Amino acid sequence: FAGGLLALFVVFVIMYIAGLSQWICIGFGVTAASVLVWLTFHLNAKYGQHGLMKLAAVKYHPRYIINRLRLNRMIKCRKQ
C-alpha cells in the first residue's frame, strides 16, 4: 500500500511538472488513490492479514510425498 502511494505521488509530480492541467493531475491522483485503497481492502478481505505470505509459502510445500519403502513393508503388521 505504501509503495503504491509513493509511486502514485511520483507519477502525480511528473504529470504536474510535464505541464498537464492541475485539475487533471488532481483527478488522476484521487481516482488512482481510491482504486489503490479499494484494492488493498479487497485483497485483505480475500486473503486475510498475512495473505501474501501464505500465498508465497504455498510454492514451498511439496505436491506429493515420496515414500520409498516397499509396499509389503508398509502393509506388514508390526508385532508389539
Image (tube, helix red, strand yellow):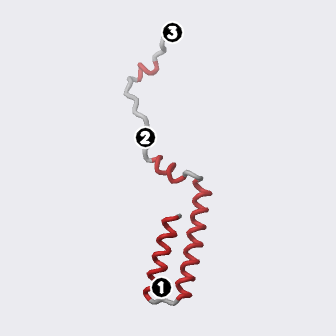
Q: Residue at x 57, y 71 (%)?
A: 35
The furthest residue to the top: 80
10 Å crowding of disc 2: few (<14), some (14-19), many (20+): few
Tell me the kind of residue under disc 2.
Answer: Pro
* 47, 23: nearer the viewer: 23
x 59%, y 72%: residue: 34
Q: CA distance from mark 2 to mark 3?
A: 33 Å
* Lower position in the chain sequence, tag 2 or tag 3: 2
> Which residue is more in the foreground, 58 or 73?
58
| Residue at (55% x, 51% y) in the render | 50
Question: Nearer the viewer's eye, disc 3 or disc 1?
Answer: 1
Q: Which residue is mark 1?
A: 16
Q: Which mark lies nearer to you, 1 or 2?
A: 1
Front residue of 13/39: it is 13
Q: CA distance from mark 3 to mark 1?
A: 80 Å
SS category of the residue bearing label 3: loop
**Under tag 1, what secondary structure?**
helix
The mark nearer the N terminus, 3 or 1, is: 1
Q: Amino acid at mark 1?
A: Tyr
Whichever of labels 1 and 2 marks the residue nearer the N terminus, that label is 1
Q: Position of residue 14 (x, y in %)?
A: 44, 81
Which mark is drawn over residue 74? none
Residue hosting label 2: 62
x then y, percent, for residue 42? 60, 62
- Compared to residue 17, the image places residue 48 above or below, namely above
Mark 1 Cα shell of 10 Å, populated few (<14), some (14-19), many (≥20)? some
Q: Amino acid at mark 3?
A: Gln
